[in-house]
Image (spheres, rainbow, N blue to C red):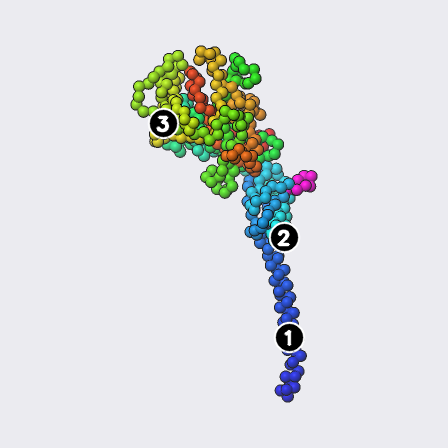
Amino acid sequence: MNSLLNWAEGPWKFLHGARRIVCCALCAVLLVACSRESDYVSLGLEAAYYIPRMSKLRLQPSYSGSAYRWLLQTAAGNDSLLSAERELIFLSAEEGTHALRLEIDTEGTTFTHSMDIHVTHENVEYSPFTSRVLEYMPAPGQHTNTLPLYEEGDDAEDMRRKAEDCLVADEMITLGAFGGYVVFGFDHTIVNVPGKKDLYIRGNANYAPDAKDPTRLGGSAEPGIVEVAFDRNLNGRPDDDEWYELAGSAYRHPATVHGYSITYHRPTEHTPIPDRKNMQTDTVYIAWEDNQGQTGYIPKNSYHSQDYFPAWIERESLSFSGTRLPGNSVDESGIGRNFILYAFDWGYVDNHPNEQVDLCSFDLSWAVDRQGNPVSLPGADFIRVYTSLNQKNGWIGDTSTEVARATDLHLSR
């Protein structure tokens, strides 16, 4: 009987073994298929995203490859390459659905993931104007400690807050002599819209009716250079983010000095040397030296008797660096009575009257890196303006950029 059972079980054991082999093979195939599907799913990207306009969306696949292409479908149905980096920060000022596709090349295979980015209107309306000041550090100057007003006991935070109050209210602040700066932002990201200017910044320049050079607009132009930074780490602070200069019309002028730096020294007890002709009570008031081997002084004039060195700063010296533009001051009288500060063509704050909106506006596409190479930025979160001239103008005094409120041109139209 046992032998009969053994004989009968033989075929069944064979069939069972065969079934196990087939099952194992099928599992192997499924595992490979699952592995391929897992690679696709592990891109870590959704099929659809919803974000408010002018808000950043960070997209990064968990799958690495040898090449990346982020492609946005245009209105004409063509593909526009947004980035060739692994990470993309998507940003748009336009509401609607944006078709985005990621292609990853790896080991001869291209993985593709398509997604729709739904850009919606913000729940709380954005303001088109400056909403905050992150840092205020003027250089010494005849308006320093008055615009805004320093009061005994004020520290750097107090002065930052006062500068913020001024810019939000569209009131002027001074940046002092060369290098003095302010860093400000909005309640949203300023989007770099191709073919359009993005930012308008007010100053207090004007044209003089007696400017003699017919080829240039002259008056009280005290140009300030604009730098911008994009908040790539999304932490809301201009810490590790790189700054880029918006290259204005004089960026490549042969007399423009890139990498210029200057150090100002707090005035010490000394005997003032006046210049009555130029209304100066002390011509050797604040000493400075620069990295071009030059030295000089910021004079004190009879119109402004307060301290010119920032009173809330405890250090004995202040250093600044940046791009120095060619001097624009001309004594048209020849005897020190009629100084005309001629405007540069475009690209600077406090360079043309505010009514010249186009000449007081800026395109983020002008951004260049430290070597002068063009940089494509999706937008800007932080704006820095600094005085770009180091010059004296007789009885008028030092050249200092003044700044008021800025406007996002994409929200003001």
Q: What element does badge 3 sit on? A: strand
Q: What label does residue 16 carry, if any?
A: 1
Q: Is residue 174 left or right of residue 114?
A: left
> On the image, which quarter does residue 58 sit in?
top right
Q: What label does residue 108 carry, if any?
A: 2
Callout 2: few (<14), some (14-19), or many (20+) C-alpha neighbours within 10 Å? few
Q: Residue at point 40% right, 33% down?
A: 157
Q: Residue at point 35% right, 31% down?
A: 315
**Magenta range:** 72-79
How far across and how far down the image is residue 130, in percent?
Answer: 50, 31
Along the line of sight, the residue nearer the viewer: 306 or 125: 306
Callout 3: few (<14), some (14-19), or many (20+) C-alpha neighbours within 10 Å? some
Q: Residue at point 59% right, 39% down?
A: 92
Residue carrying label 3: 265
Q: Amino acid at mark 2?
A: Gly
Q: Amino acid at mark 3?
A: His
- The relative height of residue 228 versus residue 308 in the rendered view (above or below) is below
Q: What element does badge 2 sit on? A: loop
